[in-house]
Image: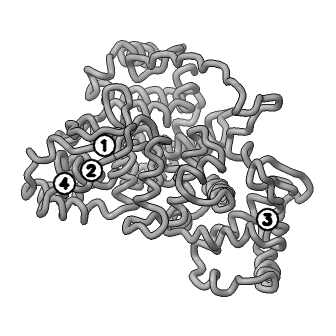
Amino acid sequence: MPTESKSTTIKSGSLLLDPKNSRIPPDRRSEDQRQLLHELLEHEDIKGLASSISKLGLFPNEKLIVIVSGRRFIVLEGNRRLAAIKFLINPELAPTVSLVKRFRVYSAKTDLLALGKIEVTIFQSRIAAAPILAEYHIGNSKKRWSSLQQARFYQELVDEGLTPAEVAEKVGGTIGQVRSFLRTEKLHRLALTLEYDSDIRRKIEDSKFPLTTLDRFLESKLARKFLGIELDVEQGFRGVVHPDRFKAVLARVATDVATETGLTRRINDEDDFKKYINETEPKIEKTKKRGSFNPDSLLGYEKPEGEEDKEEKKKPTPRAPKPSPSVVPRGFSCSSKHDRVRAIFNELKSMKIVDQRNSTGVMLRVLIDIALWDFIKSEGLVKVVCDHFDSKRKNRKRNKDWTPSLRELISYAVDKKIFRGLAANDYKSVRSLVSRDTDYFITIEGFNAFTHNPSVTPTEGDLRALWQRAEPMLEIILNN
């Protein structure tokens, strides 16, 4: 055992899932523990593992690998086991009624007392734990990661401050292999920023996505020209076409790689790429072609001009301000002319989220409901909105005060873009509130569960995530 690690037992309640877990797609990662649970449940066989643990218990030779995070511990190795343990201890964490019932069955057969404390090995940092993680999952390991998961692992080490050469030395690979994984992972991450149908997106996000096929597009001169990129030692590649052209081609390529099972076999040399490009070009959306781009800027973290190399001494990072004790962020104000909207906002702002989670969840829902309807009234849209959802006036004949549901109001507001000046990304954030995807707890369905389901209690993370999704809309409707 390396000298920079030690073994001990830790209460399972002190163990946190890893927000940077290589098994979870980068665009689906979160600091919210319940969302991480649901993501693992979608991408991994957590149900099967929970069933196995309920029958056989935990194997003593498989310790979790953790690092310290304040008074708790982040699990770097063993996230699937931890997820299964959490569902066995508290089946109500599952996202659907059927899954709650299934985990209750497993839980009833489990020695829950034995899951109260878990054997772990504590490392000082992610970098210190990297060699043993590589030993577990890279090469001929029985727990071998997919190519995509391996690439994400390398990228996490780079994000921790290692150079590609240092990553190669740490995990026992070559710098060429590491650079290849990093550039292909970046191309895949860029693909995840684009729009797809939900079925296509799931296939691109899947850990079994054939990253090696995408790597062929980077290795082929013709394919790189088609994508509009050139290889670059520092960034992996750089753009030599207009970014809109690059996005259009990449969306098509990522879709084909994810959905065409025969694509790997039929693209093996430059002649094959030439044929593929000739077949695909007519399907590409017409955009501007001339231009250039920095791939890091498309990902939202372009290095500012004049920034010193990372080898040079960095300035100390300013201490982050403490989060607001309530769900309302510090500095957020409400200037609504509606007395009740202001009163509810002030009550919500006075609630300490750590002690008043249930009340906060209910009051936040009430605030959005009343403030949004008041905004619709102020915009003169009441009749238009009611006619849209009650065209034959059946509901209003039975109840003259009838109004559409909150889900319908938000859907209408987003579809008709009634919030003047709201950016496309902000509309996307608000739209996620009315998602019917059961894997997303932070939706109107989550609001309803807080209010009507006696088994559901919101976490602090749930409530803060709800506010974050709704905040672009709240900025407008609370200051109307």
Report which quarter residue 217 is drawn in: bottom right
Specify which label sits upstream in the sequence, 2 or 1. 2
Name the residue beneath numbered marker 4.
60
Disc number for residue 227: 3
Is residue 96 left or right of 462 when viewed as pictured?
Answer: left
Name the residue beneath numbered marker 2.
63
Disc nearest the viewer among 2 and 3: 2
Q: Residue 2: x, y in percent?
A: 38, 44
Mark 1 crowdedness (10 Å alpha carbons): few <14, some 14-19, many ≥20: many
Q: In the rendered image, is residue 127 in sight?
A: yes
Alpha carbons under labels 1 and 3: distance apart: 45 Å
Alpha carbons under labels 4 and 2: distance apart: 7 Å
Mark 3 crowdedness (10 Å alpha carbons): few <14, some 14-19, many ≥20: many
Viewer-closest of 286 and 213:
213
Alpha carbons under labels 4 and 1: distance apart: 12 Å
Kind of residue at badge 4? Pro
Alpha carbons under labels 4 and 3: distance apart: 49 Å
The quarter of the picture where the C terminus appears is top right
Q: Residue at x 61, y 71 (%)?
A: 212
Q: Residue at x 60, y 62 (%)?
A: 196
